[in-house]
Image (cartoon, grey):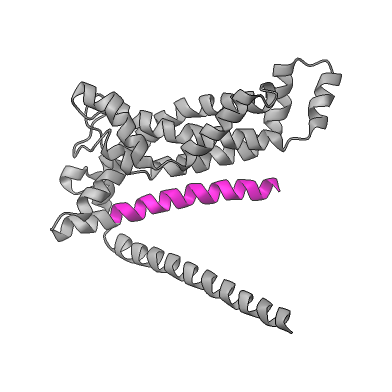
Amino acid sequence: MNRLLLNKIILVLSTLSAVIGISFLFWILATLTYKGVSSLHISTFTNDLVEGGIRNLLVGQFTMATIASVIAIPIGMFAGIWLREYSNNSKLASVIRNLSDVMMSAPSIVIGVFVYAIFVAPFGSYNGFAGIIALTIMMIPIIISTTDNMLALVPKELREAGIALGGSKHKIIMQIVVKAAKVGITTGILLSFARIIGETAPLLFTSANNQFFTMDLTGQFPSLTVSIYNLATYPDEASRELAWAASFVLTAIVLIINLTGRYMTRNKK
């Protein structure tokens, strides 16, 4: 009897906790959608920040995130491949895995301060390159961990079959093992991109922001997330409405990327 009662109590508490958590989530999304959609206009996407729009902010945010991805993806993938296929579970591999886990959980603002000290302060000005470096540092550990874990799920029989056919180690890895894990690796890359596209803290200390359209990475660079932070603190209603609109657009982008990654994983299963 006590066991049944305890089971019911735990079930009720678990259900209540889930309902509370989901309620807060829907409350946030509903508020964001209501205020964000009502603040959206065609000019929001066609004008730059100086004219009351977010065109330059979207271009700037995606530019930094895309360049960071181009740098981080090959580094993270090759590091993950080395850990799983070449390291033979050495002490160095264990150290790298632990460091990767620590970096994934490191506060983004700490990474921003580090990059500021190395790539901003010595040059005396904020710049887009520093923002890219900060986002790259955040992205690499996620890709390393994803690649390592996805390759671990590939059956060893596939590797043995490649060896039996006379394939070299690197061909077996690239043409058999990586291909077998490509859906999981791609999902990890998408989720890591979704994370950096919504980061604010590291960009506050590195690229800062720019109200005008520019592709010059040597100076302050437009950032959607930093602009949301700044606009939300302004006293005028127009700035706050633009902050709501930008927040809704950013949330929609991150949500679409995350859903795409989960859809790919579900189809793989």
Q: Which portion, as a residue range, is magenta?
A: 245-269
Residue 91 placement: quadrant: top right
Provide residue 142's location: percent of width, then percent of height.
52, 37
Provide residue 192's location: percent of width, then percent of height.
49, 40
- Using the image as rendered, state which of residue 99 and residue 25 is in the foreground: 99
Q: Quadrant of the N terminus?
A: bottom right
Q: Residue at x 48, y 72 (%)?
A: 20
- Using the image as rendered, state which of residue 104 and residue 142 is in the foreground: 104
Give yes or no for residue 74 being in the magenta stretch. Answer: no
User: Does 172 sit left or right of 242 as displayed?
Assistant: right
Q: Residue at x 41, y 53 (%)?
A: 252
Q: Is residue 25 visible?
A: yes
Q: Residue at x 46, y 27 (%)?
A: 70
* 269 up-or-down from 69: above or below: below
User: Does 76 sit left or right of 129 as displayed?
Assistant: right
Q: Is residue 216 visible?
A: no
* 151 up-or-down from 79: above or below: below
Residue lying farthest right?
164
Residue 170 placement: quadrant: top right
* 180 up-or-down from 18: above or below: above
Residue lying farthest bottom?
1
Provide residue 66's location: percent of width, then percent of height.
41, 32
Residue lying farthest front?
2
Residue 179 placement: quadrant: top right
User: Does 28 sit left or right of 54 as displayed?
Assistant: right
Q: Give the dominant element type of the magenta stretch: helix, strand or loop.
A: helix
- Using the image as rendered, state which of residue 215 and residue 24 is in the foreground: 24
Q: Residue at x 72, y 29 (%)?
A: 177
Provide residue 200's location: percent of width, then percent of height.
32, 44
Number of callouts in the render? 0
